[in-house]
Image (spheres, grey):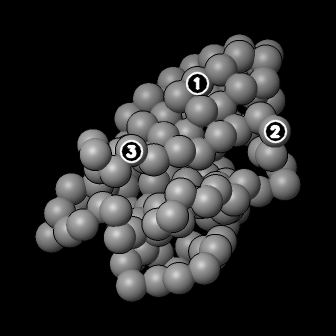
Amino acid sequence: QVHVVESGGGTVQAGGSLRLSCTVSGGTFSNYIVGWFRQTPGKEREFVATINVINLPTHATSVKGRFTISRDNTKNMLFLQMKSLKLEDTAVYYCAAAANEHGILVEASEYDYWGQGTQVTVSS
């Protein structure tokens, strides 16, 4: 059974930085495509970033240049370094993993395993 647990959320002022972490246990982490999504009340889950099994990252246009996704296969962990945070980055951030997939996965439906989410609040 695969478990996904996010950590690192919190409240930060606009312009600040925050680093999210995600631990994926069960299965073979190095074989998973993993990614970050975010969601605000009343809206659909939004793609933020993904990184594939050969360590190639893809970031959403809205976060490109400010957020960086990375993975550490030795620790079964995924990270999201967030800088120059904006008010509109406020959301619950979710970590997700996809097994037996290829390519660049930007749709939430393509992921098999999800964490409970961690709240990120950017204040003015």
Mark 3 residue element? strand
Q: Nearer the viewer, mark 1 or mark 2?
A: 2
Q: Between disc 1 and disc 2, whose residue precedes?
A: 1
State yes or no: discs 3 and 1 in contact (Cβ < 8 Å). Answer: no
Kindly state the secondary structure of the residue where label 1 is placed: strand
Amino acid residing under circle 3:
Asp
The crowd level at tag 3 (other Cα within 10 Å; few <14, some 14-19, many 20+) is: few
Q: Find numbered disc 2 in the image and state the secondary structure of the residue it sits on.
A: loop
Whichever of callouts 3 and 2 sits on the residue coming sooner in the sequence is: 2
Q: Find the distance from the CA under tag 1 to the CA under tag 2.
A: 14 Å
- Which label's residue is closer to the chain start, 3 or 1? 1
**Residue 82 placed where, x, y %?**
65, 31
Alpha carbon of mark 3 to alpha carbon of mark 2: how far? 21 Å
Q: Is residue 43 left or right of residue 35?
A: right
Q: Amino acid at mark 1?
A: Leu
Query: Based on the displayed image, in which of its 4 quarters is residue 91 positioned?
Result: top right
The image quarter containing residue 103 is bottom right
The kind of residue tagged 2 is Gly
At x 34%, y 62%, the residue is 30
How crowded is the residue under tag 1: few (<14 C-alpha within 10 Å), some, or many (20+)?
Answer: some
Give the label, 3 or 1, closer to the camera.
3
> To which residue does mark 2 refer?
65
What residue is drawn where x is 42% and y is 74%? 98
Q: Nearer the viewer, mark 3 or mark 2?
A: 3
Q: Which residue is mark 1?
A: 18
Q: Report which residue position mark 3 lands on.
A: 72
In space, the residues marked 3 and 1 are separated at their CA atoms by 18 Å
Quadrant holding the C terminus: top right
Position of residue 107 relative to residue 20, above or below, is below
Please state which of residues 11 and 110 is positioned toward the viewer in this rendering: 110
Residue for point 55% across, 40% down? 80
